[in-house]
Amino acid sequence: MTSVRFAGAAWRKSNVSGDTGCVEAAFVEDEVGVRDSKLSDDSPVLVFTRHEWAAFLHGVGNGEFGLPAA
């Protein structure tokens, strides 16, 4: 199910992720694909521009996606 343009791409995931699942990313030309590492090649791929990916990472680094306090 992996998008054709990401077939054969080098997928990367965090070195701190465990076997319970994580997302992994691949960089192809000016796009970033994100998929479920548990499903591997059977996973759908979300595709972002490099600019969108950079904005997302910036938001993560600034805590914009943290869970609200209980």
Image (spheres, rainbow, N blue to C red):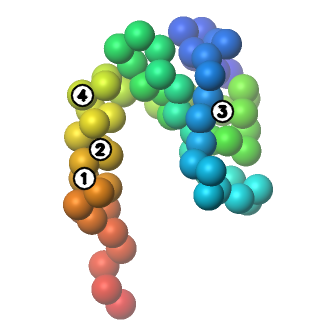
As measured in the structure, the alpha-carbon distance from the residue carrying label 1 to the one carrying label 2 is 5 Å
In front of the other: label 3 or label 4? Answer: 4
What amino acid does circle 3 point to?
Answer: Ser
Marks 1 & 2, CB-CB < 8 Å contact = yes
Q: Label 2 crowding class (10 Å Cα cut-off): few <14, some 14-19, many 20+?
A: some
Q: Residue at x 67, y 41 (%)?
A: 37
Above or below residue 50? Residue 61 is below
Which residue is at a point 53% across and 26% down the rendered structure image? 26
Report crowding for label 4: few under 14, some 14 to 19, many 20 or more residues within 10 A (C-alpha): few
Q: Is residue 33 left or right of residue 58?
A: right
In terms of sequence position, does the residue under pointer 2 or pointer 4 come before the other? 4
* 11 relative position to 25: left or right: right
Disc assigned to residue 2: none
Q: CA distance from mark 4 to mark 1?
A: 12 Å
Vertical placement of residue 2 versus 60, above or below = above
N-term mark: 2 or 3: 3
Q: Amino acid at mark 4?
A: His
Give x and y (percent) for residue 48: 36, 27
**What residue lies at 54% left-to-right and 9% top-to-bottom?**
5
Structural crowding at the residue carrying mark 1, measured as other residues with C-alpha within 10 Å and reported as few (<14), some (14–19) or many (≥20): few
Q: Which mark is residue 43?
A: 3
Residue that label 2 marks: 56
Q: Marks 1/3: CA distance?
A: 25 Å
Name the residue beneath numbered marker 4: 51
Real-space Cα distance between discs 3 and 4?
A: 23 Å
- Residue furthest to the right in view is 19
Which SS class for mark 3? loop
Return the disc, 3 or 4, that comes first in the chain's sequence.
3
- Mark in the foreground, 2 or 3: 2
Residue holding disc 1: 59
Residue appearing at x 31%, y 23% in the figure? 49
